[in-house]
Image: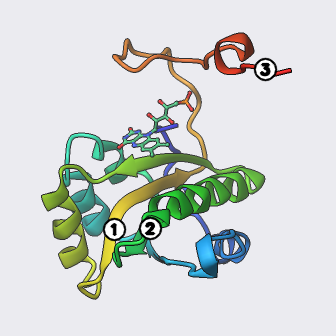
Amino acid sequence: MRHFRADPVPREVVEEIIEVARWTGSARNRQPWRFVAVSAPQVRERLSGFGGYALHLANAPLVLVLASHDNGFADTEFDMGRLAQSVCLAAAHHGLGTCVTTFHPANNIHRAADLLALPSDWLPRHAIAMGYPAPTKPTAPTAIPRGRKSVPELLTWVQ
Ligand SMILES: Cc1cc2nc3c(=O)[nH]c(=O)nc-3n(C[C@H](O)[C@H](O)[C@H](O)COP(=O)(O)O)c2cc1C
């Protein structure tokens, strides 16, 4: 979801979410992740300008940037996806809505890294917009399909 109330996300709630997410399994237990929690409005505004998919970051009271260690391991993307899901589920437990967000194209990843002063081998490819959900509005038309594929479309049996 991409529409949030203005209420801040308390620091201790963010820390409880990280406490859950840090137990996510990763290949060879490398834990190739770091988090940057951004509540500063000017920094969220800057992040929202890093590509056409990030606009909603300006209005999310908390932007949790996920940085990964860029060391060439193919498992890292899979690990980061699992981590992001852990964050979203832990946030939902606290009544928070989330939207996984991509910094695209690659130059925006580097702009975000510079803004957050990350070490050169840590890349912030994604962020998670987070906040208490705003009352739902009628949904605007979107190019992205809604809902999910059905079980028969997704599942094949070999018996
Ligand atoms: C890896 C990944 C990247 C995503 N990147 C963006 C993004 O950059 N901007 C955005 O608004 N939503 C992004 N999303 C959210 C998806 O568009 C959303 O999960 C999907 O459309 C399903 O929406 P729903 O859960 O509301 O049904 C991303 C989701 C994933 C899993």
Measure how far apart labels 2 and 1 are at the Cα level. 6 Å
Q: Residue at coordinates 71% horizontally, 50% vertically from top-left?
A: 92
Question: What's under tag 2, amino acid-wise?
Answer: Leu
- Whichever of callouts 2 and 3 sits on the residue coming sooner in the sequence is 2
Q: Residue 70 at x, y = what percent?
A: 34, 75
Ligand 1 - quadrant of the structure image: top left
Measure how far apart labels 2 and 3 are at the Cα level. 36 Å
Q: Nearer the viewer, residue 36 or 83?
A: 83
Mark 2 or mark 3: which is in front?
A: 3
Residue designated by label 3: 157
Q: Residue at coordinates 33% horizontally, 68% vertically from top-left?
A: 124
The quadrant in which the C terminus is found is: top right
- Whichever of callouts 1 and 3 sits on the residue coming sooner in the sequence is 1
Measure how far apart labels 1 and 3 are at the Cα level. 38 Å
Q: Residue at coordinates 16% horizontally, 67% vertically from top-left?
A: 111
Classed neighbour count for the residue bearing mark 2: other residues with Cα under 10 Å, few (<14), some (14–19), many (≥20): many
Residue designated by label 2: 66
Question: What's under tag 3, amino acid-wise?
Answer: Trp
Instruction: Tell me, yes or no, whether the two marked residues, 2 and 1, touch with CB atoms within 8 Å.
Output: yes
